[in-house]
């Protein structure tokens, strides 16, 4: 059995004082959660958030990281910086980074490998755009994105990676993939992982992401392939996020 994982992706929202308030409200609401709970926040909020969640079941995540250990990369953050700030997770290759900041499957792979090497758990995002689904190559695309992201990892390392299947057309739009669509494509991703890494595929947790909220979380989470959610908009309010965490 894979333990479900619900992660918030705050994106470019919340200042340190707002972030502190949000996790202060959140921690008691999710203390009894049956799943792993993660909040991924802008780096400027790490200290404020970590101070509140330290020692609780809520874990800290970053929204991106660079693959080099250090050096002349103005504006970037290293794995060591994230770890020392209390991060256990890091989102890699979110579609907004691919779309607006030139992220490629190759740099997603470099970041994923660097995260794993540093002992961080990467949440690797894959997913198709609307026109790609309509053209019928969602399965081919997510297979390529997933296997490229994982290239160079051992099966034992792959087991601990989290994949987030996020159809781009469902992010921030209020459009959700149907439970069946999400389950089916996540099944394709798991089969792709199995084709290279064998039984590690049974351990990898694969989340759904894209307008997941308190209303649709239960249905999505009933599906056998869906092991959690990456939650954008609905993670910005403690009550909403806690309802997703309590998807049962
Ligand atoms: P959304 O974002 O829940 O606001 O659609 C999800 C994501 O981008 O991770």
Image (cartoon, rainbow, N blue to C red):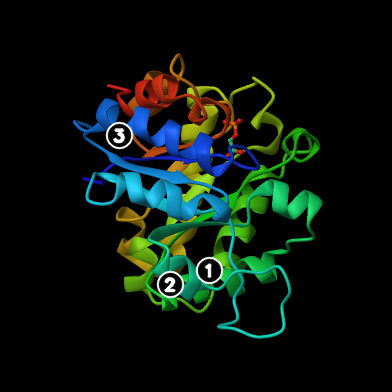
Q: CA distance from mark 2 to mark 3?
A: 27 Å
Q: Is residue 223 visible?
A: no
Ligand 1 shows up in the quarter that is top right
In the displayed structure image, the side of residue 134 where residue 179 appears, left or right: left
Q: Which residue is mark 2?
A: 116
> Based on the displayed image, in which of its 4 quarters is residue 84 positioned?
bottom left
Q: Secondary structure at mark 3?
A: helix
Q: Is residue 223 above or below residue 86?
A: above
**Do the residues bearing badges 2 and 1 touch, measured as CB atoms within 8 Å?**
yes
- Residue 198 coordinates in the image, percent (x, y): 35, 65
Q: Which mark is residue 112?
A: 1
Q: Earlier in the sequence, mark 1 or mark 3?
A: 3
> Based on the displayed image, in which of its 4 quarters is residue 156 positioned?
bottom left
Q: Which residue is mark 3?
A: 27
- Residue 210 coordinates in the image, percent (x, y): 58, 32
In the displayed structure image, the side of residue 48 where residue 138 appears, left or right: right
Q: Residue at x 53, y 44 (%)?
A: 16
156 or 51, which is in the foreground?
51
Q: Is residue 193 above or below residue 183?
A: below
User: Which quarter of the figure is the N terminus placed in?
Assistant: top left
Q: CA distance from mark 2 to mark 1?
A: 6 Å
- Residue 135 coordinates in the image, percent (x, y): 79, 38
109 or 21, which is in the foreground?
21
Q: Is residue 216 above or below residue 207?
A: above
43 or 79, which is in the foreground?
43
How many discs appear?
3
In the displayed structure image, the side of residue 72 where residue 49 appears, left or right: left
């Amino acid at each position: 059995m894979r333990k479900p994982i619900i992660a918030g992706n705050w994106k470019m929202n919340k200042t340190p004082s707002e972030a502190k308030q949000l996790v202060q409200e959140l921690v008691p609401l999710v203390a009894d959660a049956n799943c792993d709970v993660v909040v991924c926040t802008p780096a400027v909020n790490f200290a404020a958030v970590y101070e509140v969640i330290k020692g609780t079941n809520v874990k800290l995540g970053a929204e991106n990281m660079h693959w080099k250990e250090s050096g002349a990369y103005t504006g970037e953050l290293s794995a060591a910086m994230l770890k020392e700030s209390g991060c256990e997770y890091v989102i890699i290759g979110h579609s907004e980074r691919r779309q607006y900041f030139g992220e490629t499957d190759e740099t997603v792979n470099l970041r994923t490998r660097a995260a794993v090497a540093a002992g961080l758990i990467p949440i690797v995002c894959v997913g198709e755009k609307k026109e790609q689904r309509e053209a019928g190559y969602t399965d081919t695309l997510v297979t390529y994105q997933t296997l490229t992201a994982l290239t160079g990892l051992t099966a034992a390392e792959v087991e601990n990676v989290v994949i987030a299947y996020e159809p781009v057309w469902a992010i921030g739009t209020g459009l959700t993939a149907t439970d069946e669509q999400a389950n089916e494509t996540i099944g394709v991703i798991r089969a792709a992982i199995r084709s290279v890494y064998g039984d590690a595929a049974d351990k990898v947790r694969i989340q759904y992401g894209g307008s997941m909220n308190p209303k649709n979380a239960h249905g999505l989470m009933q599906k056998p392939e869906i092991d959690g959610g990456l939650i954008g908009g609905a993670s910005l309010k403690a009550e909403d996020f806690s309802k997703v965490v309590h998807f049962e």
